[in-house]
């Protein structure tokens, strides 16, 4: 309840009002206690007071019973008794509802809540996907390659495309970024597919949540942002990692404010043990650092869990405002845990804190808040005030109407797929494929042209040879004709020669024979005449 500008949470055994000072609320806190001891009621009362103070609040609704904060509480005989016992009527207590925004990473019971792969980062993403140290290192390298090449990682398609791209081009990247095993990349790909099955395909997309949208007021009251976690809690890693991401976002996006008079926002992390279960050392160190530094951004963080030992010592040491409901000790280990919880409080000489914690009833707690001077207050045994809003769940119709009435519903209702790694790498692949196809086509054209040229050359050579053969044939024909003509001439010459020689021989023979006389003279004259005739013909016709 909000009173005198402070968070009025409880009344101690002496009837004194116990307040949480607004200026100390960003020093963080712890709400612990066994199941059924009243942690949820305490959380509600604090959240209502912060809202009345004008401070926005975030709650993770694990059991579905925080949704009733949107509606006024219901009167009953039991409530009237409590109102009278605490003297609430004269202090302005009234049943009322609070401004609420419902959120759901599955988009079923609230405004669709999204983020991007890049904003989640490799460390938190590796935790969701249960990657080992080597796989986490490779995922970090893949993120670095994406950043260096201007490739946005928005959704799971982008991450899968990037992993396949890196795997296909390992030889090019390993010289600069180090060895990356194909088996490890394949394991990360399988983990991404499993993440998609768990809802990652819906959760990782645009528009991603602008965490500043949660720092809002309505009619002077801080808006209470309720994350439906009934289904989400079944995936403890996704639930816890998402909450850590939101805290990191606040740390990164909000400006430094030092020590404000009241927080800019308060986060309640229910089932806080899931935040740290099986978390690697690097993640625990990051959580411890963020919790330590986010205080300077005006953000108060309150961890709700069953046992303080669920919180790592480095984080637990920073939780200055403490509310401890009952713990049960059935074993020596349980007793040791209760003893540790009791020893974390500033001792009150009026009672034994260890015994008191074990004897607390439902709705009772031992409480220690920071005082004005920053020192822890003496532990007080207290009864927690009742909430002013409705206890329990709301109807589906009430929830749906509240979601539609939210100013943020239209902003986050529809998702879109921007130009990111998947689209860019797809284009690069198509361009590469087109270039290969063009090169193949050009090679085929060049091959065809070379074959055609070779054919032309072969045909030209064949034609040349054919022409040569024709020429040689013609020359042979001409030679044969010439030989025939020469033979004919020779024959003709011989025939003429024989005739002329005979005639000449006879004439000469007559002359010579007449001169010499007798038979001898005729013979000599004939032979001489024939020889003389042949000589004349040879001279005229040759050969």
Image (cartoon, rainbow, N blue to C red):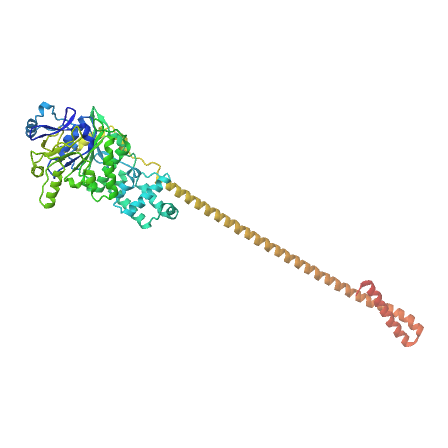
Q: Nearer the viewer, residue 180 or 216?
A: 180
Residue 457 image position (x, y, % from top left): 57, 52
Q: Is residue 285 visible?
A: yes
In the picture, the quarter occupied by the C terminus is bottom right
In percent of the image, x 13 and y 31: which residue is there?
377
Q: Is residue 225 visible?
A: no
Residue 289 image position (x, y, % from top left): 25, 37
As drawn, 499 above or below 129: below
As drawn, 14 above or below 313: above
Residue 341 image position (x, y, % from top left): 13, 39
In percent of the image, x 83 and y 63: which residue is there?
540
In percent of the image, x 22 and y 42: which residue is there?
237
Direction right: furthest residue: 515
Query: Image quadrant of residue 201?
Result: top left
Residue 156 image position (x, y, % from top left): 30, 41
Q: Is residue 238 left or right of residue 19?
A: right
């Amino acid at each position: 309840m909000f009173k005198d500008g402070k968070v009025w949470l409880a009344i101690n055994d002496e009837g004194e009002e116990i307040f949480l000072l607004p200026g100390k609320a960003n020093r963080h806190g712890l709400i612990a206690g066994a199941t059924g001891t009243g942690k949820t009621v305490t959380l509600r009362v604090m959240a209502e007071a912060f809202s009345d103070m004008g401070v926005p609040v975030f709650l993770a609704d694990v059991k579905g019973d925080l949704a009733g904060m949107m509606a006024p509480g219901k009167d009953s005989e039991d409530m009237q008794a409590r109102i009278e016992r605490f003297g609430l009527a004269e202090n302005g207590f009234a049943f009322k509802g609070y401004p609420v925004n419902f959120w759901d990473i599955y988009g079923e019971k609230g405004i669709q809540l999204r983020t991007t792969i890049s904003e989640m980062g490799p460390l938190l993403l590796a935790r969701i996907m249960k990657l080992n140290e080597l796989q986490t290192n490779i995922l970090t390298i893949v993120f670095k390659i994406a950043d260096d090449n201007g490739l946005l990682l928005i959704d799971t398609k982008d991450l899968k495309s990037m992993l396949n791209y890196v795997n296909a081009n390992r030889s090019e990247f390993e010289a600069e970024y180090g060895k990356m095993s194909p088996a490890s990349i394949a394991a990360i790909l399988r983990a991404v597919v499993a993440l998609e099955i768990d809802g990652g395909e819906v959760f990782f997309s645009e528009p991603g949540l602008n965490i500043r949208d949660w720092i809002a007021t309505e009619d002077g009251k801080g808006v209470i942002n309720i994350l439906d976690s009934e289904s989400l809690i079944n995936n403890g890693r996704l639930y816890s990692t998402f909450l850590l991401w939101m805290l990191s976002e606040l740390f990164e996006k909000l400006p430094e404010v030092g020590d404000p008079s009241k927080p800019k926002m308060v986060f309640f992390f229910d089932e806080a043990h899931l935040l740290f279960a099986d978390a690697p050392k690097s993640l625990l160190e990051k959580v411890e650092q963020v919790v330590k530094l986010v205080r300077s951004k005006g953000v108060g963080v309150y961890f709700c869990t069953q046992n303080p030992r669920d919180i790592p010592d480095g984080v637990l040491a920073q939780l200055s405002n403490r509310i401890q409901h009952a713990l049960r000790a059935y074993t020596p280990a349980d007793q040791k845990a209760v003893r540790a919880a009791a020893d974390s409080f500033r001792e009150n000489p009026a009672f034994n804190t260890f015994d008191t914690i074990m004897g607390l009833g439902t709705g009772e707690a031992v409480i220690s808040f920071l005082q004005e001077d920053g020192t822890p207050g003496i532990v007080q045994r207290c009864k927690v005030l009742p909430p002013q809003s409705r206890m329990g769940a709301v109807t589906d119709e009430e929830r749906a109407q509240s979601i539609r009435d939210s100013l943020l519903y239209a902003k986050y209702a529809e998702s879109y797929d921007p130009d990111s790694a998947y689209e860019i790498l797809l284009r690069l692949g198509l361009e590469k494929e087109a270039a290969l196809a063009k090169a193949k086509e050009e090679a085929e054209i060049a091959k065809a042209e070379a074959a055609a040229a070779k054919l032309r050359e072969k045909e030209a050579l064949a034609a040349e040879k054919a022409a040569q053969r024709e020429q040689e044939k013609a020359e042979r024909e001409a030679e044969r004709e010439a030989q025939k003509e020469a033979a004919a001439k020779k024959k003709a010459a011989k025939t003429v020669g024989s005739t002329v020689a005979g005639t000449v021989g006879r004439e000469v023979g007559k002359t010579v024979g007449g001169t010499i006389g007798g038979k001898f003279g005729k013979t000599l004259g004939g032979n001489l005449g024939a020889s003389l005739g042949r000589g004349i013909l040879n001279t005229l016709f040759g050969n």
